Structure formats: C-alpha cells, structure tokens
Amino acid sequence: GDIERKTLMAGKTEIGIISRKGVVDQGDYALAAAKDLLAYYNDYFGQPYPLPKMDMIAGPGSSQFFGAMQNWGAIFYFENELLFDPKRATESAKQRIYTVVAHEMAHQWFGDLVTMAWWDDLWLNEGFASWMEGKSSGVLVPAWKSEAAAVSGEREGAMGIDATSATHPIIRKVETVDQIGEAFDGITYSKGQAVIGMLESTLGPDVFRKGIRSYMAKYKYGNTVTEQLWAELSAAAGKPVAEIAHDFTLQGGVPLVTMTGATCNGGVTTATLTQGRFGLDAASKTPQTWHVPLVVGNLGGAQTATIVTGAAPSRVTIRGCGTVVLNRGKGSYTRVMYDDAGHAAIVRDYARLDLADRLGTLGDDFALAAGGYQDLSRYFAVMDKVGPDADPLEWSSVAGALGRITGLYDDTPLEAPLRARSVAILGPVLARIGFEAKPGESPLTSNLRETLVGRLGTNGDTGVADRARRYVAALATDPTAIPPAIRQPILSTYAVNATPAEWDALLALAKAEKSPVAKNRFVTLLGAARDPATAGRALALLKTDTISAPQKAGLLRAVAGAHPDLAFDWAVANRELVESFLEASTRSGYIVGLGAGSNDPAMPGKISAFADKYLPASSRGGVTRSLSTIAVRKAAADQLRPAVTKWVAG
Ligand SMILES: [Zn+2]
C-alpha cells in the first residue's frame, strides 16, 4: 500500500514506525530512542507498559494546535516531530524528535494508564510529561545537559508569562471548548514542568520516584485529581507536601526571594531573606507569599535547605564563609535577588558557579532589570563574565537576551546600534566554534552554531548573509548543498534578508520540494522577510490555492514575526478568509495573537475593538495574553532605555 511499517522488539513490547512509503528508515532514530525510553519508563514508573505493541505514526502535514497525540499504543506525530532526515535536519531537530517521543511516551503512563478526571487538571498530564522529557534524556543522553538547559529554557518561558497579569493558577476551572484550547499554554506545560521539578528537588529524586510509583500502582486504569498525587508524594516523603504544592498550583505568580546583609562570623554565615511577588507589570506587583523551598549555599562550602514562608524577613544560617548562592542548583521556581555586596560576590565568582546557577543568574538578572527591581548594568556585569570557554548553553542564553533587548526597540533609533553590538559580541563566538560542524563535537556546540548563524545572519552580519545567498543558489542544482548542521539558519538568513526576486526563488524551491516536512519549512520561511514589499508577496500568496490551509496559518504567523502590524491589519481586513484556514481550537486566539509583537501604541486599541466585535466573553484568553505581552514589552522598553542607551554608547 501507500504506507510502511518497521518494528523492533523492546523486551516484550513491539515498537513500530508507520509512515508514508519510502521514508520509513527516517524513523530509525525515533525507534532507537523509543526502545531506550521504554526501558527507562518501565523502571521509573514501576508499572511495565501493558500493551503488546506501541506504534508511532508519522503523518504528513501540520497543525496550529499540536505536534503529536498520545493515543495509547498508537501515538500520532506529524512527520517533522518524528522522522529524522540526516541530509536536511540539524542537531536541534534531532533533539526535538527525541524530546517529543519522550513526552508522548511519558503520556502512555501519565495520561493514558492514569488519566486526569477533567480538563481542570490538564497540567498533571502535560506538566509531568514535559518534566519527563528532561528527566529521561538527562539520564539517557547526558551530553544535552537537559536539566540545566531547562533553567534557561522552560523555566524562563513559564516565568515570562507568570510574572504578568495574563497569568493564571496551574489548576483552574475549565468549562468551555475555547477554555480547553487556552489551557494548552506555557503555564500548564512549562510552569507545570518547573513545579514538578521543584518537588523532585525538594523531596529528593528517590523519594519522589517512590511517590510516583505508588500513585501509578494505586490509580492505574483510573482517573485522578491533583490532590491524589500530593497524597502519594506526602506518604512517600513522610511529611506533607500540600503547603508547597498548593501555593504553586492554586495561585499564579512568581516568588522573589531577596537576600541582604550576609556576614560571616566564627565560620558561620548568616543573612536575611525576604519574599514577595515578582512582577513584570504593575498589575502583578501585588503582595503575595508562598512556601518557597530554597537551597542556600556557600561557594565551596556547605549548603542548607530552608522553606521561606510569610512576608516577614527571616534569618538563614549556613556553615562556612564564602560567596552565598541563593536557590543553588536553581531547583526552585523562584527569582532571587542579592544586595550590592552579595551581587558583587556572584559576579566575582561567576565562573565557579555550577552551570544551572550560571544560567539561572543570567535569567534572574535580566528579568529583575526588565521588572525594574535592579539596573540592567547588573546583567551586563554577569554577561561580561561569559568567556570564550563558557558552556554553549550560556552563549545561547546571552544570544537570547540580546535578541530580546533588540526586539524591544524595533523601529526605533536604538535598533541599528543594538544589532551592530549583537554582531560584535556573537561574531567572535561563531568564529571560534567554526562555521561548519566538526566531527565529534558536542551536540550543544552544534546547537549553538545554529543559534549564532541565525542571529548573525538576521542581525546584519554581511558575511553570513553572503554565504547564505551562495548556499541557496547552489540548491538549484543540488538540493542538499547546505550542510545539514546549518541548513535551517542558513535558509532563515536568506529568507529574512530576501529581496522580492530572492523571495521568488524561495517560492520556486518550496514548490519543487517533494518532502512534506521540508516543504512546510520553506513555506514558513516565505513569511520571514524584513522588507515590507517582500512580506506583501507572502500575504498575496494567502489568497491563492498554491499552499494548504495549515500552511497558510503558519505563513501568516511567520509574517507577523517581522511585521505584526501589517499581518494583523491584513487579517482583520480578510477575516473570513483567515478563519477559513484556521482550526476551531485556535480561532479565538489566532488573529489577536498576530498583533502581540507590535510596538505601535495604536495596537492595543485595535485588538480590543476586534475582540469586542468578534469574540465572546468566555474566549478572551488570547486577547488578555496579547494585550499583556504588548504592555509588558512597553514597560520593559521604558524601564531599560537609559541603561541600553548607555550600553550601546559605551
Ligand atoms: Zn503532552
């Protein structure tokens, strides 16, 4: 027939890949990953996978809403999430496939074997499966340093939303279909992941796993609510976890723990800790407290585990003297801030911090500046300590921060100097690791190269942009002319800088492409151009039958990346056409989401007017999110402008 199936045995379970004819071998990577993961999960959950087979089905196409679905024993994936094409895919794409397989397989237990009773507890499925991505790959593929990577990845993503007025508790009432759609958000997935990770680090991995095993044993083939998980974890720990767990799941927001006055006398360090709520906008800067589990350590010395409670200052005592590190290991879901002396010590000893603490410090210091709690110069002082031999994850974090700073000032006089400064900082890093992959290099170095080529190419580095043009010209005679390790960022560079004539060449490549995965990527790239006239061509394409409905949804969202105002206005003017290519579950948030990247003061009014006219009151989650995103970015831009102006001049 038109499909193929390939299998291998993993213990008593037959694992299969089902795909279009001719590409089943691209499933080899996922198949091998699934075999390792199945053995790991059988042991971790203490309940062996109960079905005789587990198929993984690769479907062509894409969705605005999901990449995969954890049907028990027959997991569905879109091809790009499952099939690995070594001629075209980058290292990060491979990592992505592993991560998605790990996530969907975790759902065979958390989701399928035990199922949430109702959508209110969606986070139990998604938070746990997301956390398991890093937990399992941390053991099975240690070179990815997944747990440290989550500190600058998912943790930052969750806190970015959670520190704004658009946040919500992890557990909340779901009553309508639109609310189900809205529930699949960064709070459910990434904050859920971070809170699970915090409980594991607070209880210890063995105690935590014991609790999970008894939860699985007790509730298999049944439905649960979150309280039943807390009960099993409490029983395993021999102490209640509900105080901490409730504080982080029944109320939204990010705690901020501040240390002042650390002193060392007679070989013992004491300091004062206070807590409050960290906010990126005025509405979220309200008094609020948590039971915050916190590890406080001395560099090179002892550490102590405490729980910060209430609003009143408390004292913490640690054996030994030395630089004090708050939230050591960054296991807890909290921002931390130091007084001047404490921060100066962190900067001085930055290189001696563990990787998770270096990444967490970069994240905290940037966010604290954006929220107006401290000057951005503190972030730059830490960033200056990220040296030539720093971990690739640190440089990825720095590249991300430079991108965020630049994005705050798009279309303002600061944009050009910020782009130039980014190129000046990141160019030498790329020069050091080389433009092309070296045999045997660490996968994180490969990932960093992808990031740097993309950042430099889209920030006006002419060397990278010229290379991209040469590579793309070569595609006409050889579809694999671009080395796989840099294929995607090279194509992005070309697309961002494309002239209308170059856009036509890209369209020709998209039309000629046979692989559905590669074709979808080309179509998305057609929306990346910075030149408005070129972006207009992409919009015109939406009125033709050249591309499919899901491709149209992806293309318009891509146009909104560089041109949020243009994309939003176009979508409003062509509302019926746009809604015709959307899936029902994304309809309420899609058009208003297009404007979320706008720095135009008129955009919030336009979004509200659209919502009043077309969206029912129960479907305003996307509107709230978009308005909050705009307000938070404006607040950060105003807050940081003096420090940024000084920095680009310095
Ligand atoms: Zn999931």
Image: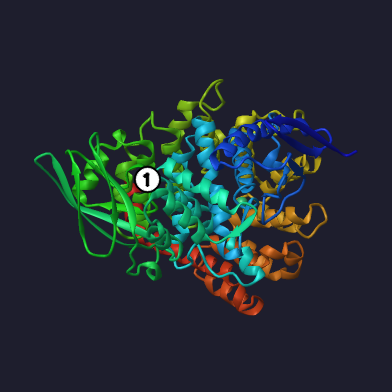
The answer to whether 441 appears left or right of 366 in the picture is: right
Residue for point 38% across, 58% down: 244
Which quadrant of the figure has residue 391?
Answer: top left
Residue type at mark 1: give it: Lys
Q: Residue furthest top?
A: 439
- Does residue 482 lie above or below 48 as drawn? above
Q: Quadrant of the N terminus?
A: top right
* Mark 1: few/some/many CA within 10 Å (<14, 14-19, 20+): many
Residue for point 63% across, 49% down: 528
Residue for point 68% across, 29% down: 86
Residue position marked by numbered label 1 in the rendering: 330
Q: Residue furthest right?
A: 1
The answer to whether 115 appears left or right of 276 in the picture is: right
Which quadrant of the figure has residue 84?
Answer: top right
Residue 437 is situated, as x and y percent measured from the top left of the image, at 56, 25
Residue 600 is situated, as x and y percent measured from the top left of the image, at 51, 66
Depth check: 357 or 503 in front? 357
How many badges with numbers are in the image?
1
Q: Quadrant of the C terminus?
A: top left
- Does residue 443 lie above or below 364 as drawn? above
The answer to whether 433 appears left or right of 561 in the picture is: left
Q: Give the structural element (helix, strand or loop) at label 1.
A: helix
Q: How is the image coloured?
A: rainbow
Residue 210 is situated, as x and y percent measured from the top left of the image, at 47, 44
